[in-house]
Image (spheres, rainbow, N blue to C red):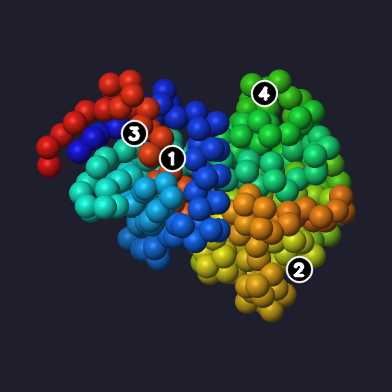
Amino acid sequence: MLVVPEALIADLVSAEDAFAAVEATFAAMAREDAYNFPVVREALGEGRQYGFKSGLDRAGHLLGVKSGGYFPGNADRGIPNHQSTVFLFDPDSGQLKALVGGNLLTALRTAAASAISIDRLARADARVLGMVGAGHQSAFQMRAAARVRKFDKVVGWNYHPEMLPRLAETAAELGLPFEAVSLEEMGAQADVIVTITSSNAPSVMDAHIRPGTHLACMGTDTKGKQEVEAAILARARVFTDEVAQSVSIGEAQHAIAQGLIAEGDITPIGAVINGTAPGRQSDDDITLFDGTGVGLQDLAAADVAVRRAVERGMASDVAL
Ligand code: NAD
């Protein structure tokens, strides 16, 4: 069994690698060459959560599980609140193949998903990027978005305004001007809006969004969470990583519950990648990607880490 520790991931897997790996697995899912197993997610009390996301990708020859969770007390102990590890198994024999640190991989594969949606669905002439959320993930999402469109400005809003300088720092790193704005102003200026918050109530409202906007809603990955008003989904063309997760734990759970859209109105982004479903059809379409986060994204990104580590002689081989 190979071990690829967390500390090596930054050298082994780039944003470009994550983009290519996640795009291939979304495409395989839409061809039914790959599928995710039901998610297990449990509240452990005192704000702690733990879960298992797993799947099989026949095309990518991947079988595995990401086990991970959120431990709010960790920051006080000097370790990240989010903790995850990826286990890869041989799909032919069931043998454990690799154990891979999953924290940075989670950030990279989540950023890749929103970037894939922007690449495929946002207007080609998108110039202003809107960021809702300024936590750990926000920098990864912004950097990945900037790889797929020539933005000339970033506008940002966060529920906790004291965190906004983090967005300004990432924009500066990308050489882009940053402006902190109200949500009304964001809707008026932004061509693409990425939401990445742990909110339980909508921040972005229907009245904020003008025709032509692309939204990548990435924070809602659990029942009860919500970042955008459900009415936006009724007006938008809705895409997702996986329809089953979108309607149960994703942003679409609310629009479905309110009868505003039906499951059949949601298109897997993999079908757009494969050319079997249309993406944006007019400059005035509002497109919305409901990025719920699937286990296969983790397996695909971990597989890159393992392959690179083997190529460079950096993986430890341990007998189990
Ligand atoms: P974080 O804890 O570092 O940041 C949380 C963000 O949410 C901050 O911007 C904070 O100000 C904001 N926030 C907190 N309470 C809010 C409220 N009531 N209303 C609006 N905003 C609020 O978390 P992170 O690592 O940046 O992750 C953000 C979210 O993305 C989390 O909910 C996480 O579960 C989710 N996530 C999703 C995926 C996926 O694949 N879809 C992957 C990773 C993380």
Task: Name the residue carrying label 3.
Answer: 306
Decide if residue 139 is on the left or right side of residue 228: left
Amino acid carrying label 2: it is Ala
Amino acid carrying label 4: it is Leu
Which of these two is toward me, 193 or 202? 193
In space, the residues marked 3 and 1 are separated at their CA atoms by: 9 Å
Task: Name the residue carrying label 2.
Answer: 234
Q: In the image, which is nearer the foreground, mark 3 or mark 2?
A: 3
Density class for disc 2 (Cα within 10 Å; few <14, some 14-19, many ≥20) is: some
Mark 3 in CB contact with mark 1 (< 8 angstroms): no
Query: Which x, y percent locates residue 121?
Result: 73, 48
Which numbered marker is on residue 174? 4
> Is residue 189 visible in this depiction of the protein?
yes
SS at mark 1?
helix
Which of these two is toward me, 176 or 270? 270
Density class for disc 3 (Cα within 10 Å; few <14, some 14-19, many ≥20) is: many
Give residue 211's quadrant in the image: bottom right
